[in-house]
Image (tube, rainbow, N blue to C red):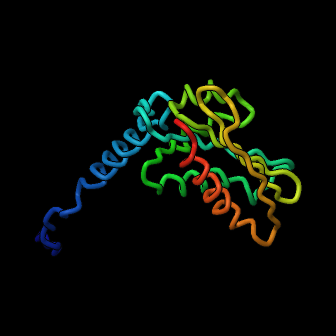
Amino acid sequence: MTMSRVPHDPPTPPSPCRGRGKLWLASCFVLLTLAACDQAPTASDVPAPQPGERSVAVLPTTATPPSVEVEELWREVARLLAREPGIRVIDPDIADGFRADADPVRTATALKARFVLTTTVTGAYRCDVLLRDGRTGAILWGKTIPSDHDNVGALAAEVWVAALAAIKVAKL
């Protein structure tokens, strides 16, 4: 009896991608772990104010009734103010934990800010803006900015221009 040989393919060399699935999985795990450890900034992360510094905490907008159109007004105002040289704006992610109706002295102390800026929108886009002294709580400046649905996008710029002028002339 003779045995016939079955032809077979020669052995294939190992794939250059072999074992890379585990490497990819491990690198994803490391990235997720690093992202989970990265915490949001807190008030203790804010640097202490320098003497003569114009630092401002822009607090979240209060809207009555709640309005999607003005929900992020305060963040946009903070972003615009932060572009100004000589003015330090407290990170909005940190200021997000504070409210306009809170004691301005406690808020300014916690956020290490010289001034507290609040915006309140009522009714058909009437925006009341207040700049308060972080040491005494006194209202240093206030303005009502009327708006309507057609120009609600310009509201942040109007608040920014008016507040910037008030911050620049406020006594330290």
- Residue at image position (76%, 44%) is 62
Residue 76 lies in what quarter of the image? bottom right
Residue 145 shown left or right of residue 90 in the figure? right
- Residue at image position (85%, 47%) is 64
Q: Of residues 55 and 68, which is closer to you in this image?
A: 55
Q: Position of residue 125 (x, y in %)?
A: 82, 58
Residue 146 shown left or right of residue 158 in the figure? right
- Position of residue 85 relative to residue 12, above or below, is above
- Residue at image position (56%, 44%) is 92
Quadrant containing the N terminus in the rendered view:
bottom left
Residue 103 shown left or right of residue 115 in the figure? right
- Position of residue 107 relative to residue 160, above or below, is above
Q: Of residues 73 and 13, which is closer to you in this image?
A: 73
Residue 101 lies in what quarter of the image? top right
- Position of residue 3 relative to residue 121, above or below, is below
Q: How many marks?
A: 0
Q: Position of residue 163 (x, y in %)?
A: 62, 52
- Residue at image position (44%, 38%) is 53
Residue 56 lies in what quarter of the image? top right
Q: Position of residue 146 (x, y in %)?
A: 81, 61
